[in-house]
Image: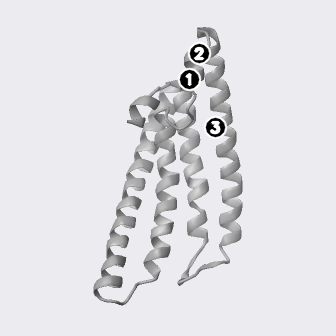
Amino acid sequence: MKAFILSLERWTTGIATVLACVMLAIASALGVFQIFTRFVLEQPAEWTEVLIRFSLVWMVFLGIPLAFRQGAMVSVDALYQAVPRGVKRVLDVVVALAALVLMLIILWWGSDYAIRGSVQTVAGLESISMFWAYLALPVGAVFSLLAIVANYLDPRRMELETAQ
């Protein structure tokens, strides 16, 4: 079962990471396009600002699973190094449970926001529902839940390595 969970997490976190990178590329391209239209053509494209914001939100929530998996999301290094060896596993359980609870809350409320936001339209892009913006929360939470469990089963303490 452990091998299956780790394999599934490796696959899902890989997908989330690639999608987060795509969202960053989209935000960057739209930013360049916005600069070009605003300062060169002197005809700003207002719709790009909204799409940049959406893509950055998606990028963040799709990038969170990688941070959890690398052990870089919740910084408890100082406490982890200060406690005796027997308490370290208890600390791992507490941190994992706290992160799981947070992600379950985000999943619950994010789903609720997405459903309620489906009747709202985006200012500047009236053909797009706010559902798509709010959907980033539950999608990112689901990916993160798997990454938290995987990091508990196979811990990676890469906080210091990823901070540099």
Helix, strand or loop for disc 2:
helix
* CA neighbours of label 1 inside 10 A, class few (<14), some (14 to 19), many (20+): few
Q: Position of residue 89 (x, y in %)?
A: 61, 17
76 and 15: which is toward the camera: 76
Say which residue appears at 66% left-offset and 51% top-offset: 107
> Which residue does the numbered mark 1 point to in the structure image?
78
SS of the residue at dot 3? helix
Q: Residue at x 61, y 23 (%)?
A: 92
- Residue 17 is marked as none
What residue type is disc 1 on?
Ala
Q: Nearer the viewer, mark 3 or mark 1?
A: 1
Tell me if 104 is positioned left or right of 45 in this view.
right
* Between 127 and 56, the one nearer to me in the picture: 56
Q: Residue at x 56, y 68 (%)?
A: 132
Per the image, label 1 sits on a secondary structure element best described as helix
Position of residue 35 measured from the top left corner of the image (x, y, whole percent)? 34, 77
**How many numbered badges does the structure rendering display?**
3
Outermost residue to the left: 40
State the residue position of label 3: 99
Which residue type carries mark 2? Ala
Disc 2 crowd rating (10 Å Cα; few below 14, some 14-19, many 20+) is few
The CA span between labels 2 and 3 is 21 Å
Specify the amino acid type for callout 3.
Answer: Ala
- The residues bearing labels 1 and 2 have C-alpha atoms spaced at a distance of 6 Å
Quadrant placement of the N terminus: top right
Q: Against 160, is 44 above or below?
A: below
The percent coordinates of residue 7 (x first, y second) are 44, 34
CB under 8 Å between callouts 1 and 2? yes
Q: Residues within 10 Å of mark 3 (few under 14, many from 20)?
A: some
Compute the Cα span from label 3 to label 1.
Answer: 18 Å
Query: For mark 2, what is the residue?
Result: 82
